[in-house]
Amino acid sequence: MGKTNFTFVRPMSWVASLLVMAFMFVAQATYAQTGDCGCQDQVNVTLGAECTFTLTLAQVGAGDCEGQGYRVVVNDRNPGNGAIVDCAGLYTYGIFDDNDDLVCWGEVLAEDKTAPVVEDHYEKPDDIECVYIDDLVNNPNSTDDTHPLYIGHVSFADNCGGCGCEVEPKFFDRVEYLDCPESASFGDEYDYAIMYRKWTATDCEGNTFDTTQTFTFYRPSLDSLVWPDSEETQTCDIEGKDRDCPMPYWVGCFDEDGQNGNDRLYLDELECNYSVTVSSTEFPICGGEGVKIECTYQVFDWCAEESQDLAEYL
């Protein structure tokens, strides 16, 4: 007849009850060590990437503890997993023999010294018109992917997140304005400023991690200006017509009002080394019943140190 082997596994509730009874006894009296094996009064450990640490007899035992079938159990959040320390804190540990009798006990101080890590991040890949600098600097809306001014975010995770250790992220923006290009030409496009967004993530234990995002702002070229459509304003009936010179504009990369497509960035509102002066001259047409308006836009480019007149007729 063949030999049959059986393995008996104690239910977890049995193990937990044993541990509770053992540590209750420890709390009431000082437990003497058995034989030549004793326990360190306190052991300090640093938790790993999973917010755990596995104690060994060599770390906590004092004297001859190894090679006798002894094992370590930690009375932490999950004593059922034996020698594994779960989460940061001060816990009681015990050394048990193969009969589940308590040999000795001590304390283990588990510390989390691991900083948070970046879990996810996004940066707007395209450069941004210089007019938006003030709208974006230190603006929390710019990190909200549902907001029109969203340019990116960084999210963090902590190794002890499963233990309830939360991460508090903060950011601070610093803008560096760039010098004019050495060979600046009138009306050229060029990089105007760089914004450095420094993120600092701090977990519940005070561990910090820093990372920086970079955003480039540019001055658009005059060649990319959109001019008002003259044909829409040509008429011999000038009653009720707006006779002011319309301002040319660029189409921005954001839609702040969410109504009529991306923003119009008007030439006289873009103070990125441009200045503009508008003048107009009226010419009578249609036998004096109408006027033709010559709008002159004198643009001064501070980098090129040059001004030019741009004209449009209405």
Image (cartoon, grey):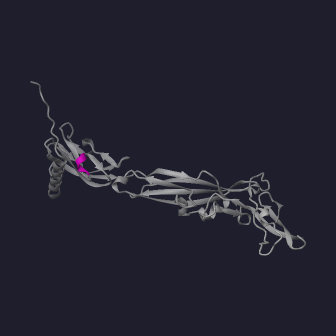
Q: Is residue 105 above or below residue 231?
A: above
Q: Residue at x 89, y 73 (%)?
A: 288
**Horizontal side, residue 199 vs residue 286: left or right:** left
The image quarter containing residue 54 is: top left
**Which residue of the protein is positioned furthest toward the top in this rendering?**
1
**Magenta residues: mostly which secondary structure?**
helix
Q: Position of residue 18 (x, y in %)?
A: 15, 50
* Magenta residue check for 123: no
Give the residues in magenta: 78-82
**Which residue of the protein is positioned furthest toward the left in this rendering?**
1
Which quarter of the rendered picture does the N terminus lie within?
top left
Work out whether residue 41 can be spotted: no
Foreground: 139 or 256? 256
Q: Position of residue 17 (x, y in %)?
A: 16, 52
Which quarter of the rendered picture does the C terminus lie within?
bottom right
Q: Position of residue 208 (x, y in %)?
A: 45, 55
**Horizontal side, residue 170 vs residue 182: left or right:** left
Q: Position of residue 152 (x, y in %)?
A: 55, 55
Q: Is residue 191 above or below residue 57?
A: below
Q: Is residue 42 above or below residue 234?
A: above
Foreground: 64 or 80? 80
**Horizontal side, residue 185 vs residue 131: left or right:** right
Work out whether residue 123 can be spotted: yes
**Which residue of the protein is positioned furthest toward the bottom in this rendering?**
239
